[in-house]
Image (cartoon, rainbow, N blue to C red):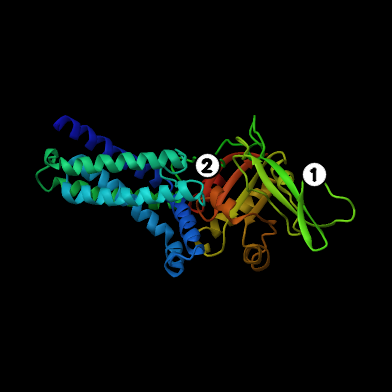
Amino acid sequence: MNSVVQIARILVGSLFVFSGLVKAIDPLGLGYKMQEFFEVWAGDGYLPGLMNYLHSQSLWFSITMIVIEIVLGIGLLIGWKKNMVLSFLLLLTLFFTFLTSYVLFTGKIRACGCFGDCIPLTPIQTFIKDIVLSLLIIFLLIYKKYIQPLFKTVMGGVIILLSITGATFLQFYVLKHLPLRDCLPYKKGNNILELRKMPAGAVPDKYEYIFVYEKNGEKKDFTTDNLPDSSWKFADRKQKLVTKGINNIPAINDFSLSDSAGVNVTEAILGQPGEYYLLFLQNMNTGVRNWSAAFSNLAQKARQQNRPVYIITADKEKVNAFFNIRNVYNIPVLTSDATAIKTAARANPTLFVMKGPVVQGKYSWADIDKAIMR
């Protein structure tokens, strides 16, 4: 039995550490995922005041959850305070099971993000994983007498403290400098225009259209091959999904650029030859002083090298006021969907160095000076 317990301990502890680290390289990703849950629950009327507050604190919630996950995993691996660690692990796993079951059985959220964007799992896979984990932790609670601490001095506490510090530092580092590993479709080397196309071998959704006609106060449904005569008056049209498509969602599904007149200029901007810069700016809420000087230097270099610069934002009025009214940058401000910007740019702002539709480099606001030197 001792060997089985040790295998289970190593398996559970390692999985929690791995899961936490995968999310720690992009804590904003988990924060955005939690925002989805809070938005849905608020919309469904479940404590909307609390859900809206948690929505505003989603990043801190994400950072805290990731630290707890990593520290509990390490605590189990070294046998530190096993009663407390196992109890918290069970509570955390039950919480994850609730989230994954909600995703699986309601269909209101596409995925739970349990392993971040680097290891996407289907709802059924994550649900089964959490059930198995719960059973393993219950097993460890029953046979916890076989779990002995690896360190009987204060070293165990020191390791836990270092784990908390390291997990927290890692997350704040990537929040400032972008994720250590980019697992999103906008990563370096990707062709954005190609990824906006339907995947090869895609099967589109098949719909049936139902036409509603009215006559003498009576409404009746008709199909396209069985339309009524001219004595009936058209009232409505309904669309019914007959067959769900397969692999029919592009990797980049919601990204488009519009100019000041509202014209879609995505193909024109991304299809141009040569190098140019895209500055993704969600809003003007962050400290402009932290990056404005570096951006001024970049804009000056871009003019000297005849490289176009574009600002991409969802907050057009405030951003345009800053760049082209209060400051004479003379830079086009393009609008895009806020969710697409959050996906493309994990820091606010984030600079893309582009060559045609291909991403040559990505730099957070703290590293714009590196783009100047390339």
Question: In this figure, what is the number of numbered marks?
Answer: 2
Residue type, numbered disc 2: Leu
Could you tell me which residue is drawn at 44 percent across and 38 percent down?
119
What label sits on residue 357 in the rendered view? none
**Residue 111, position as x, y percentages in the image:** 48, 46
- Circle 1 is placed at which residue position? 224
Residue type, numbered disc 1: Thr
Q: Earlier in the sequence, mark 1 or mark 2?
A: 2
- Circle 2 is placed at which residue position? 184
Q: Quadrant of residue 360?
A: top right
Disc 1 crowd rating (10 Å Cα; few below 14, some 14-19, many 20+) is few
Secondary structure found at label 1: loop
Q: Quadrant of residue 223?
A: top right
Residues at discs 1 and 2 in contact (Cβ within 8 Å): no
Q: Give the quadrant of the C terminus.
A: top right
42 on left or right of 266: left
Foreground mark, 1 or 2, reads: 1
- As measured in the structure, the alpha-carbon distance from the residue carrying label 1 to the one carrying label 2 is 42 Å
**Residue 369, position as x, y percentages in the image:** 52, 49
Secondary structure found at label 2: loop
Could you tell me which residue is drawn at 19 percent across and 31 percent down?
4
Identify which residue, 258 or 324, lies in the foreground: 258
Q: Is residue 178 visible?
A: no
Identify which residue, 91 or 116, lies in the foreground: 91
Q: Is residue 112 above or below residue 219?
A: above
Identify which residue, 71 or 353, lies in the foreground: 71
**Residue 151, position as x, y percentages in the image:** 12, 42
